[in-house]
Amino acid sequence: MTTTALTNQQIRLAARPVGLPKPTDWKSVSEPVRELADGEILVKNIYLSLDPAMRGWMNEGKSYIRPVAIDEVMRAGGIGKVIASKSPKFAVGDYVSGTVGVQQYWIGAADDKAGAFHKVDPAMAPLPKYLNALGMPGMTAYFGLLEVGQPQPGQTVVVSGAAGAVGQTVGQVAKHKGCRVVGIAGGKEKCDFVVNELGFDACIDYKNESVRDGLKKHCPNGVDVYFDNVGGEILDHVLAKLAMRARIVICGAISQYNNTTPVKGPANYMSLLVNRARMEGMVVFDYADRYQVAVADMGKWMKEGTFKTREDIVSGLDKFHEALLMLFEGKNFGKLILQVADEE
């Protein structure tokens, strides 16, 4: 096909946000799609993954991944369809997942390391699932819980952000491993979902009840594993309820990402000493060579009907900014995904 007839709309980072991102922190750019060189592919993006980690990628400074540069297309994982190929690795018609960016098309080397493209099979699961439990959030939940949290049958696992992409998977994996699972989420609808649909044993509604009282009620023997997605006050409440030799998995701290003041550290950290507990951070990329293990396990549970996921899909590339803010306002219900094209 003649790729130069196509126009690519992109969302680029215009300024480094202070606090919550503003519309002026982005700029929309349209440019023609160039011709492919040997070894390259052209991907038409269909779904983009919107994740809390994106807020950190906008900041200058050293982290586990380089920051997005000013005037660079905003980094995002996604799924698309190969519509042109000069590479033996992917054929026209293949569905692929990788780091595609917030744009309509991705073009580059099929073996681009930053892109990290791999085929996905829409016959095995709907495409959005590959951005949820079968994608980066699922890998984060699976390895963070099992490798860092090391839950044992009968132990109590608590997870914050329980109705989100990572949280819903953490809870279900823990249940499959024979644990008691208590979620923390915002609002009755989300709490009902994780208990009635996902099979959690209980859920604490932090918007309408005391987290401290909820932990006392639902974790009478203390918390053996805490999977932390939010940080802040909720982390402090859990620290006060640790069981002996508890493990805390630091996955994220969404309550702190848009601070304009210094990040608030845990006030109850001495509980780690008293309870001989440990707190450990995790980054999903460390487990990249074992992703297939997690996909096989969760894919099997899905087929058996014992594992569920929920996606919250917003349509339109022009909705990127307002959709991203949903993450930090607690407005998404399930894995937040931006759909930028129809499936074909």
Image (spheres, helix red, strand yellow):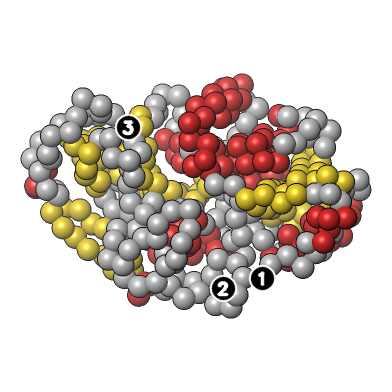
Q: Residue at the spot x=48%, y=35% of the render?
A: 288
Residue depicted at 73% across the width and 65% down the height = 266
- Marks 2 and 1 close (CB-CB < 8 Å): yes
Does 171 appear above or below 269?
above
Q: Name which residue type carries label 3.
A: Tyr
Q: Residues within 10 Å of mark 2 (few under 14, many from 20)?
A: few
Q: Quadrant of the N terminus?
A: top left
Residue 95 — which label?
3
> Residue 72 sits in which quadrant?
bottom left
Q: Amino acid type of disc 1? A: Lys
Q: How far is disc 3 from disc 1 in space, using C-alphas?
A: 42 Å
Left or right of residue 52, residue 119 in this image:
left
Q: Is disc 1 placed on a helix, strand or loop?
A: loop
Residue 28, percent across and down?
26, 65
Residue 214 visible in the shown view: no
Determine whether 46 is above or below 256 in the image. above
Residue 32 makes an appearance in the image = yes
Residue under pointer 1: 264
Query: Which residue type does callout 2 highlight?
Result: Asn
Q: Which residue is mark 2?
A: 259
Q: Earlier in the sequence, mark 3 or mark 1?
A: 3
Mark pair 2, 3: CA separation = 38 Å
The residue located at (21%, 25%) in the rendering is 88
In this rendered view, identify the residue nearer to me: 273 or 204.
273
Between marks 2 and 3 in the image, the one whose residue lies nearer the viewer:
2
